Image: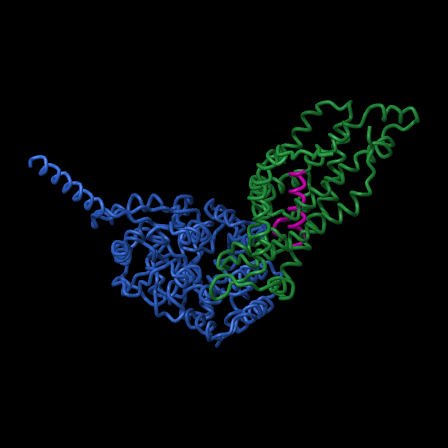
Amino acid sequence: MNYRTFTATLLASTLLAGSAMAQDVTLTIESWRNDDLSIWQDQIIPAFEASHPGIKLNFAPSAPAEYNAVLNSKLDAGSAGDLITCRPFDASLALYDGGKLADLTDLPGMANFSDVAKSGWSTDDGSATFCVPMASVIHGFIYNKDAFAELGLQEPKTVDEFFAVLDKIKEDGTYIPMAMGTNDQWEAATMGYQNIGPNYWKGEDGRTALIKGEQKLTDADWVAPFEQLARWKGYLGEGFEAQTYPDSQNLFTLGRAAIYPAGSWEISGFNGLADFEMGAFPPPVPNEGDECYISDHVDIAIGMNKATEHPEETRTFLDWVASPEFAKLYANALPGFFPLSNEAVELDDPLAQEFVSWRDECKSTIRSTYQILSRGTPNLENETWNASAQVIKGEESPQDAAARLQQGLESWYTPGQ
Amino acid sequence: MTDRPRRRWHIAVFLAPAVLVYTAIMIIPLFDTLRLALFNKGDDGAVFVGLRNFATLFGDPNWSRQFWNALINNCWFFVIHMLVQNPIGIALAAILSNPRLRFAGLYRTAIFVPTILSFVIVGFAWKLILSPIWGIAPNMLDAVGLKSLFSPWLGKESSALTTLALISVWQFVGIPMMLIYAALLSIPDEVLEAAECDGITGWAAFWKIKLPLILPSIGIISILTFVANFNAFDLIYAAQGTLAGPDFSSDILGTFLYRTFFGFQLQLGDPYMGSAIASAMFGVILIGVCLYLFGIQTRIRRYQF
């Protein structure tokens, strides 16, 4: 009898221990942000685990350039993590259509996000959302405050003022007016065309009209940014044709260039490198008093692997990601990646705060080529890189570049389908 | 006679490991790529489309423009190698095989070292050397008063591909040098001495005696250069990125294939069109090698000592 009780106790304790073990669920997060490993491990994961006992998190990033390929093969093989960090638009949409990502439209936290914020991870008609938006990046110009003070310059508000500032820096000769090269091509499009463009095509109005086919890339509003880019040539450093992206970053942070056409993701890197004070101004508007528009581009989100064994816990975590608590934590840990939730978030970094403050003054939009329009061949985004670089170098006229892009787009895209 | 030739099993046994490994990692993937080129994405998985991918590649102006651009660039890449790398390699080998040259071992090693460097190191090192901002090339030209000759070569459409080809020549000139050097050393002294008796010395000896004897080696080097150039990818990728800028002026078949197969930025990877390009590359190389084998190799005269 005694023996039996003992056995029963043992068995019961094993069962209890087993169930206690089972309650401690570990969720694995797939991500391309290997730069953020320490932020997840030191700040985000402890904060979540403290408030949600029983759920453990394992952040398992892979190299950015390989992420899409690695993730796809892991998903096909059934060995992918429970949580999937989502690239914006088609890469994630393909995963959702392929049944790899779960539908999260009914997640309570989704109410915290606007339609523009959700656009990167929704079906074309907006009926289903499959990733919780985490952060966006904002475009603008970062400048060397010391250099501006030395030359007696003010932040330019209009395009004319912008070029007047550039002329003065060039005349003085101490600084390269603007640090940007065309070697890697993408800066010309991303920090050039998509940065200054929304002021001309009126942000979301122009972008959606382009998708609906009501506007064309050859319309004046879409050619105008190219016309401004063509004027940039004279203000870039000597040999800008072979200047790479890291070259430009170094030129600016070493204090050799005065203005840097930027994306907000540069902030944390620049803070560590530059020993002068930095300021930022939004892309200048064409005329005094025009409404301003900024590229507030959705960049990163997180979704649920449909094949996960722990859907409940995964949804709990995703709901937490959608909360203001996560937004505050993430935005301050990574200045330059701004939360997308409607809740206002106070940032400690002054430069990041400057960038995010433009959301109050200007209307937000996302990059024009990202939604739907880069699905076919030729790929509009890649073509825009090429065209922007060619226009800056003066090897293609703004009109020709726009005509080439429109022709390429028309060859496979019929609006309204 | 009842004596049947014995089956020689040991031949099969000894061949098996190499054949199996080679089949698994070379032959099967090759034929699978050729097979994949005949499929395309349908409503549910891959659908057999026959030669339609090739029709797109050569018929659709968006694809054919890129393909021909890459092929022409690739030919130019090869021409530079043939015109610069191989003559320099032969000249270096001829100089090195001169018995009166001192420190021959040092030169030989120094010239061969870049060959064993990684493409990535070579690409980045040259990008830095030629950088208009931090590079030493502008300063060196300035020191001899030739600053006006400098331009951002890698960033200009007119010069990017040639510059990259010359970087590749710098890296690989050691290979033809070594092969020719070995061929030159294998020429028996008696032949040269006999020529000397007939009054053929110095340059005349090189042109009339040595060059004909090393022609088969030059042939082999040419075909190796051809295959390596048409499969090239790494250097362009390391120096100019996937878009092979500026304006695709340094795009070769390898980078075009990579961009198509694995995708790039917003462009999703297309394994079917990628395979079609890979098959076209295979075809180009096959034709080139066949032309060489049947057109040239069979006509080269060989000498037995």
Relative to B24, residue A261 above or below: below
- The chain whose colour is green is B
Relative to B110, residue A139 above or below: below
Decide if residue A76 is on the left or right side of residue A132.
right
Relative to B61, residue A182 above or below: above
Pick the front one: A68 or A261: A68
Q: Residue furthest right?
A: B198
Q: Residue A219 at what x, y percent from top left?
A: 53, 74
Magenta stretch encompasses residue A229: no
Q: Colour of chain A?
A: blue
User: What is the basis of the colouring in this image?
Assistant: by chain
Q: How many marks?
A: 0
Per the rendered image, the range of residues in magenta is B152-172
Please say whether residue B32 is visible from this viewpoint.
Answer: yes
Q: Residue A65 at what x, y percent from top left?
A: 47, 50
Residue for point 31% across, 51% down: A332
Decide if residue A113 is on the left or right side of residue A165.
left
Could you tell me which quadrant the N terminus of chain A lies in? top left
Decide if residue B110 is on the left or right side of residue A264.
right
Please say whether residue A346 is visible from this viewpoint.
Answer: no
Residue for point 34% across, 67% down: A128
Residue for point 49% across, 50% down: A257
Q: Residue B2 at what x, y percent from top left?
A: 71, 34
Q: Residue furthest bottom?
A: A214
